[in-house]
Image (cartoon, grey):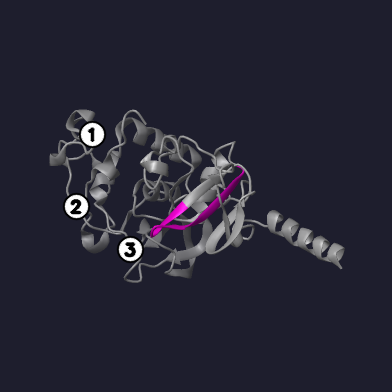
Amino acid sequence: MCILFDMRALSMYAALASAAFPGCVEKDTILRHNGEHALFADLAAHGKSYGCFLDDCTYSDKFVAVSDAECAALCKSIDECKFWTFGEEEGETKCWLRLSDGGKEGLAGAVSASQDCAPPEFPECVEDNVILRGAGMYAVFIDAFRFGKQSGCFNDDCSSTDKFGSDSMEECATTCLSVEECTHWTFGAEDGSNKCWLRNGDGGKEAKEGFKGGSKFCSPQDAATSYLQAEQETGNSACWVGGFSYELCCSSHYGPGGNAVCFDGSFTYEKCCFRPEL
């Protein structure tokens, strides 16, 4: 009887491991550190700056993540990471990187998986024939002028819009990647021209022929790499308008919070600056 149970459990595990993301994710499971299973890495080098161990993202096994897809994608990009786990800590959703699954425990709401359980890369990750509606709560409004957009905007106002004219799906995906609040994007034709819509979730998903959609982390790899390198070298390029610059706003000369005259409710040190030493 015990042998039969073990064989069934093994078969179920094998099926789970071979399933495509997110079917390969193990639900209600967390992988604890337990003093030996955590992978500490320079997560700042991967663009992470929030929710890290002792607030130091240069040496951390965790970071604030918006989804299990983000967690899985980062683990896959680090050779030493063999497992990942995603759940909530102190009111924030976080990702933990692991060397093994030796600290596995049950925890409602948490999910875990091995390194090879990750979303497909672009463009396989793109979902065809879907549109992500704003539905009054999912729209992300930005100043599209900061991205060189001057047409196709909401109410013809590109200074505050959740959509804009876009040349390609690739451009749409890359723009979402560069906007902190954006977690999903959708691309398609409206009024005879191609447009991009930015979203903070996929709750407004509907079937719509010809439209395409994806998560923040479904973007061209070369664009993602270039964006990350630019962020590390000069901060968030979308912040540098009206005479402001990385050097003026983010220099350590002004202290840990940068130059206060640069920041308001829309532009903050955390959004715009990456410390040079990171």
Tell me where residue 64 appears, x and y as whole percent. Answer: 41, 50
Residue under label 2, please give it: 265
Residue visible at 47% across and 70% down in the picture: 206
Q: Residues within 10 Å of mark 1 (few under 14, many from 20)?
A: many
Q: Is residue 186 left or right of residue 6?
A: left
Q: Are marks 3 and 2 in contact (CB under 8 Å)?
A: no
First of labels 3, 1 by sequence position: 3
Hey, what amino acid is under mark 3? Ala
Q: Is residue 185 above or below residue 263?
A: below
Tell me where residue 71 appears, x and y as whole percent. Answer: 51, 50
Q: Is residue 85 magenta?
A: yes
Q: Quadrant of the C terminus?
A: top left
Q: Which residues are magenta?
A: 82-94
Disc 1 is placed on an element classified as helix
Q: Main secondary structure of the magenta part?
A: strand
Looking at the rendered structure, which numbered label has been put on residue 278?
none
**CA distance separating discs 3 and 1:** 30 Å
Residue visible at 47% across and 49% down in the picture: 217
The quadrant in which residue 46 appears is top left
Question: Which numbered mark, 3 or 2, is in the foreground of this view?
Answer: 2
Q: Is residue 47 left or right of residue 273?
A: right
Disc 3 is placed on an element classified as loop
Hey, what amino acid is under mark 1? Cys
The quadrant in which residue 201 appears is bottom left
Q: Quadrant of the N terminus?
A: bottom right
Hey, what amino acid is under mark 2? Gly
Q: Residues within 10 Å of mark 3 (few under 14, many from 20)?
A: many
Looking at the rendered structure, which numbered label has been put on residue 139?
3
